[in-house]
Image: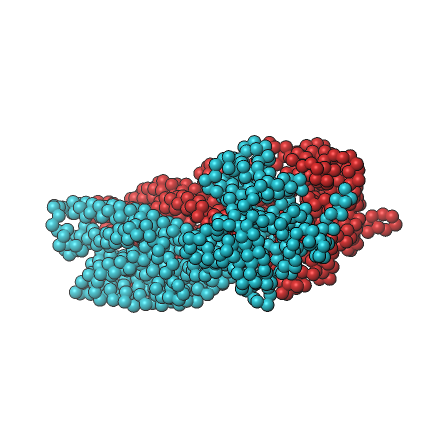
Chain colours: A red, B cyan
Amino acid sequence: MPPGGSLNSKMGGKRAEKPLQTLLRLFRYYKNSVGLLIFALLSIIAYSAATTATYYMMDPLVAVLEDGVSADMAKYIALLIAMAALYLIAVVTNYLLNRLMLSISARVLCAVRKEMFEKMQSLPISFFDGHTHGELMSYFTNDTDAIRELLQNSFTQMLISVTSLIAYIGMMIYLSIPLFLIIICMGICIFYVMRVVGGRSRRNFVRQQRVVAGVNGYIEEMMEGQKVVKVFNHEEAARAAFNVQNEELCHVATNANTYANIVGPLMNNLSHIFYAITCTVGVLLAAPVPGQPFLLEGTWFAQHQEFLVVDHSDLTISIVQGSICHLQKFPGKHCCICCSDEGTVTLVRVEEQNGMLIETDRRTGHWAWKRDGELIPMRGDVRFTDVDFSYDGKKQVLEDVTLYAHPGEKIAFVGSTGAGKTTITNLINRFYDIADGTITYDGIPIREIKKSALRSSLGMVLQDTHLFSGTVMENIRYGRLDATDEECIEAAKIANADFFISHLPDGYQTELVADGANLSQGQRQLLAIARAAVSDPPVLILDEATSSIDTRTEKHIEKGMDALMKGRTVFVIAHRLSTVRNSDCIMVLEHGRIIERGSHEDLLRQRGKYYELCTGTSELS
Amino acid sequence: MGKTKEKGPGIRHLKPCIRGYVLPSVMTPVLIVFEVALEVVIPLLMAALVDGGLYHKETYQLQEYISKLPYSNNLQFVLWVGGLMVLASLLSLLCGALAARTSAVASMGFAKNLRQKIFDKILQFSFKNTDKFRTSTLVMRATTDVNNMQNTYQQMIRIMVRAPIMMVLAAIMAFRIDTRLSFIFVFAIPLILAPMLLLVLIGHKRFRMMLKKYDTMNGAVQENLIGARVVKSFVRKPYEVEKFNRSADDLMRTQIYAQKLFSLAGPIQMSIMWGATIVLLLLGGQRIASPTATLGIGELTSLMSYSTQVISSLTMVSMIIIMLSLTRASLDRINEIFEEKIDIDSPESDLVVETGEIEFDHVNFSYSGNPDVLNLKDVNLHIKAGQTVGIIGGTGEGKSTLVQMIPRLYDVLSGTVRVSGHDVREYGLKALRDGVSMVLQKNMLFSGSIRENMRWGDPDATDEQIREACRIACADGFVTAFPDGYETDLGQGGCNVSGGQKQRLCIARALLKKPKILILDDSTSAVDTATERSIREGLSALTDMTKIIIAQRITSIMGADQIIVMEHGAISDVGTHDELLARSTIYREVYESQVREEANA
């Protein structure tokens, strides 16, 4: 799959492919359960052997009864006791099997989830921007549901069927070659029918999967935008749009299920037809020769087949079909896009001894880049040279951007919305990689720096604030996990968040619901600033960090912010000119280019765009 | 099954979902009755074939019918009976295939209606309602839980009919062959059902627990999707992964705990079935070997085949019972949605908003509903139609809360909000919200083109009207600069445009409603000052529309007819710019903090 390629088109474009490969991939997850799996397999073999043996015992039982009144009842009862013993073995092994498979499948499922989550965490931002949340959520809900079914029920069932089938075929060859041939014919027929019906069912399940993801995405979007839906009286339209998708889902699901449902009656009746044929052949063959009871095994085979198939086939088949298509979307697919971090430079703690930098484990507050064993002190020097960038490869967002942020400088970006200010910050932290030009950090091209190291050295307060469920304290500590309570409170004070937090019902221990919905937009921004403050990074990026905070509060936090920015390289994006005025350098961006640069006073003197913006005499597009 | 569904609203909410699919729902069991009947006849034919054709016995099953067939030798007899069996199988297959279709139509249709009903209900939810659930659990309920219901419904119309009929017919046939031996079933039935019911009763609680853990885990995933940028910029992958792993392990343990009970189900059923087989063989064998042989070997085989049918039907019934217990947890969760009382209801009313006059009369409000923790305190306010009103105040002082009372996004705790002279609770919600347009602080555009998003404001808007609204909101310029213009796809949440562009599009969308009252809740924060001013100028031309502007920048509201200063959920002062500058310290502070920069300029 090409990086960023659409999952949807992939799923829709081709029918489910190489189910075997997918299954093999699934087997990898079993590696931590090998011991249990061996026991489970032994149980399956014991179970199949025991049940098959009981059918084999029908032969001598009937042979005894054929003598009619003179039958040897002692022998008959002895045989029955043996049969009961076999049944007992089957029951016990079946329990073991169920219990083991449950443990195994729960473990495997857990491993699948963990890996998916980890993969998701490794995906680039462009992936999240390009997929709806609902779509991604359905990996964790519908798809894992289907896999659970596959692992727990269908899989066991299939294993039992296969081992049993092998046992039967062995028995048939031993008992009667013509009977065996009939069974083979039956097998071929069943195989063919399954291929046709199963194939159709699978194709429809693939489509269903795609539609389900769409429906989920729609519900999710409408939920997230609930306020807007309400304010615009859009309920009716949302209903209608949902209805369309819902109808389509219904249509596709009906087709998929029809084929899956047909399998049961088909198998069942095929086995009856074969029984009739077997009997007829049996009469032709067996009438003149002794040993008619062979046929009874044939009978039992047909009946057992029926028992196996009728009970579970409908569910099993549909589930296996469904799960296999789901599995194909699973982690393996995304590998190629998430391994794009070729950076090798890492971040280490250092201390100075005799004028030399030494790597250390102690918390010194000093950091350095480590490149091929060489330590480069981290200072926060960021340079852009002739940077071009485009999100989609068509529309140029940044052109020939060159800038130089000296350590400890405050660089501000000013410009119309859409001029490319946020894009610049997206490039510094490598949410996106540049197409052309170079960006260096302390002289190291940022592509060579490990993403995690790079981002640890940057403190970000983003335009859209996101908080996590948990206490206020936990949310602040998100900036640096080993921060003490005091450090968190100190950071909250810097951000002027301490006041409102102490007025919350449980103060710092107040639980935030999803994404901090119980706080106002401005309060959330204050928390985001506190979070960045606690992380104590050499470089700070503030992207409209105070846009929802009123100017009065902003004035209150000004001192704190100044303290926070002191000695750090800071990139500020703001509309409010008061926020950027005291910057060392202000860049005015227009259409992805830097059109003016300089300090506040310089720019005013230039009487260019910035001047017009400040005085309001002109408009930025 | 009735036993498992007695508490709570039960299936009351589900019944209407069958509408439109009654015919296939009824056809399925009917077809299945035929299928089963044929399936039950087949073992009789089998017995006749073995006893009559193979062992040449004088008496065999269905003799009174088969003997009428025109056969002259054994081979022809076998061919006739075998042929009948093939015919019966084909008919049974036909019925089965038709039932497969009808059951799929019925159950998928049922699920469709159920999903629609849930979605409808969720759409009616007030914010208070939504706050109670979380988005992730609502989505789960509308998908995973509906899926469970759909599967159960399908199994019910197929197997709940099939199994009992199969059981009864097979039992009748068995009794026909040998009454005494068949009494074995009378013992087998309770032996299977009793332990199953026990399992279900114990299992239900454990399953609910499992689903809850499941919800928690999904909530964590969703949060990570939404906050992906934050997780990445703080390099919290290991932390998040560890947190997730803990909840996944937790879920795994609960899952094993819940499901290990059902590992017993299969072995219990098998013991009963095979126990019955041994007893049948023992007693049946004695009968065959007795001097007064009343039973043929073929008959014994058929008897065993009926025994399999009876007991496997029982197995199916108990499997359904297990499934119902799983479904019951899902049903409960769906019912929670249906039972949730919508706290903002829309009265039947023909009132429409005629003017943009607004009045707050001693309004108190609390998000928690607790009169001791008020978010709005005794707010009194009068805004004349057509006025421009600015609201200013600190973060979390209640500005957004105040304006959310006007389109009735929340209901007051006490006091009254009047629009155009009428209490907002007297309007139908649609009429009220048609008259009041609001651009929210947390803006949201939806997947689809810009044009489609604009039509949210007015579904019948012409292209010219859309452009006009965009011109006022200063959005026309950048939209037409896009290669696809108004057809540009916005992506989920409008991720293809910048924050400021998004805000301008949202304003245009609100304008298209041609409201009497327009509320801008800090909706130009990401728009540059120059653009903002021209938006303001464009708006001032719409003189009969009341405009309420919440803003951080004092320049945004300086020219307003009234400016409201909010502090701690109460109105601290109201007046014009000059009045407030003279008497309000808060206002002066704000003014000075912002105007200083202009002085510097």
Q: Residue B341, how many percent across, how many down?
A: 45, 61
Left or right: where B95 falls relative to B495: left
Image quarter of the C terminus of chain B = top right
Q: Residue A418, how many percent across, how many down?
A: 63, 38
> Residue drawn 15% across and 54% down?
B63
> Residue drawn 44% across and 38% down?
A15
Left or right: where A589 falls relative to B18: right
Q: Residue B154, how many percent across, how many down?
A: 35, 53
Nearer-the-camera pick, B97 or A579: A579
> Residue drawn 72% across and 48% down?
B594
Left or right: where B197 falls relative to B383: left
Q: Is residue A264 visible?
A: no
Q: Residue furthest right?
A: A354
Left or right: where A495 falls relative to B571: right
Q: Is residue A214 visible?
A: yes
- How many numbered circles does the render carry? 0
Nearer-the-camera pick, A292 or B255: B255
Nearer-the-camera pick, B118 or B291: B118
> Residue drawn 70% across and 32% down?
A400
Q: Quadrant of residue A448?
A: top right
Nearer-the-camera pick, B440 or A56: B440
Q: Residue B1, how many percent across, how many down?
A: 35, 63
Q: Quadrant of residue B310?
A: bottom left
